[in-house]
Amino acid sequence: MSSLLITHIGTLIGLHPKETLLLKGNEMAKLPQLQDAWLLCEEGLIQDYGKMDQLPQHLPNGVKTVSASGGFVFPSWCDSHTHIVFAAPREEEFVMKIAGKSYEEIAAAGGGILNSAAKLQLATEDELFESASVRLNDMIRQGTGAVEIKSGYGLSVESELKMLRVIRRLKESFPIPVKASFLAAHAFPLAYKNDHAGYISLIIDKMLPQIAADGLADYMDAFCEQGFFSVEETDQLLNAAAKYGLRPKIHANQLSVSGGVQVGIKHQAISVDHLEATDDAAIAALANGDTIATLLPSCSFYLGIPFANARTLIQANVPVALATDYNPGSTPSGNMNLVASLGCIKLKMLPEEAINACSLNGAAAMQLADQTGSIAKGKRANLFITRPMPSLAYLPYSFGQSQIETIILNGQIQ
Ligand code: NIG
Ligand code: FE
């Protein structure tokens, strides 16, 4: 593999020591930087960096040089919560929403997750792979350099496995780390509407053993929510997943206080995600712990539901990550730049906090913080170069616009 030297970096951002794998509380506002810098990538990794007036004398043979022209260099965004494998968009629900229908009402009228599941059943693996690839390429162009992808629009043995095989193919085909979460517990299929125990045993006895045997999932997910999976059902599912070594990353407290946070923590969840409806008991359960609160402000923005209380979580010394939740129903967008902006504008996070939440803590929410999410020697050289900006705050400030000029993955300009 070749070497790449980036010169004339206005500001190099996110120089956390390699041993720093998770940021919580006050640490989240710390984003170490270096002005007027260079950075050398070798064999796909960050080899070294320093000040421009101390450029290394001896550079590797055949090194390619690129000037950042005074722009910032960031570690790539780490999007730790997405549902980008789906068969079709749901813009008809968008119009229903504009006319005043709620997310729950749309689901009850035959829209929602079941609508996506019906369409996914008819799609081939190739079609799903092609459409998810277009989405993932768009996300990469917007600065994402690591991603988690969920199943959950299959809801049958065959279709859940189909989705997970598509995610595996994305893992094998893309130059960024991809993690898979198994989310058959996303909604009860119509046939099991009055037979919850039947669907849960389908997941536990038929899906999980095959998925584990084929190594198709990294994590177990469940939508713990009123009208979806109860705390008891979630508990049962997470117990079963633990037997196969699958730790949870779950949907909790999105539409109501569900008890999902506590059941997630009980099962050593890597992250509990959403938390728009979080109460004091959930905050107390998370306080000072290592379970990451993954907040999804572009979902709140799109659905018009409350925004999560990031300030209270940070004050309670909880590690906070930000992610897109890219999916056809509640967040048809995979733009982490917008998520960083909404983190600042709507969650009142400082730019440094939002950027850490979109990078290092996002990596931690996929157990990838040892290899990506910050600029440290030996980490994967997944980075982006921005236009020259007056300050760090300019990136989230200029919401809805991209400041990114160049994407670098594994030390190679894309
Ligand atoms: O994270 N809340 C559950 N799942 C998705 C939405 C799924 C859908 O509407 O298709 C979410 O928001
Ligand atoms: Fe989600």
Image (spheres, rainbow, N blue to C red):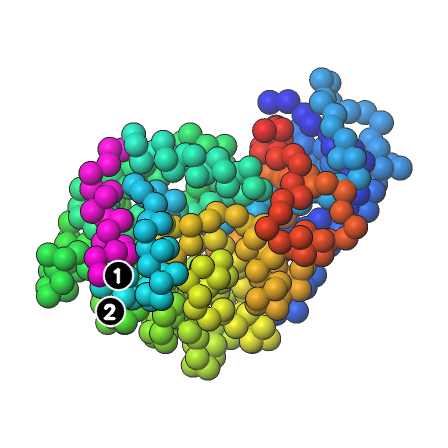
Q: Nearer the viewer, mark 1 or mark 2?
A: 1
Q: Position of residue 60 (x, y in %)?
A: 73, 22
The residue type indicated by label 2 comes to Gly
**Residue 107 marker:** 1
Q: Is residue 229 left or right of residue 273?
A: left
Which residue in the rendered view is the most extreme toward the front? 99
Quarter of the image where the N terminus is located = top right
Asked whether 407 or 234 is in front, the reply is: 407
Residue 305 image offset from top left, x and y in percent: 43, 68
Give the magenta range: 109-125
Q: Say if the magenta span includes residue 112.
A: yes
Q: Residue at x 28, y 56 (%)?
A: 112
Can you see residue 22?
no
- Cα–Cα span, label 1 and label 2: 10 Å
Q: Position of residue 74 (x, y in %)?
A: 67, 45
Secondary structure under the numbered disc 1 in the rendered image: helix
| Secondary structure at numbered mark 2 | loop
The residue carrying mark 2 is 227
Q: Residues within 10 Å of mark 1 (few under 14, many from 20)?
A: some
Position of 120 with respect to 389 (left or right) is left
Q: Main secondary structure of the magenta part?
A: helix
Give the residue at x 72% y 53%. Answer: 394
Q: Is mark 1 within 8 Å of ligand 1?
A: yes
The answer to the question of whether label 1 and label 2 lie on touching residues, with beta carbons closer than 8 A, is yes
Quarter-wise, where is residue 396 in the image?
bottom right
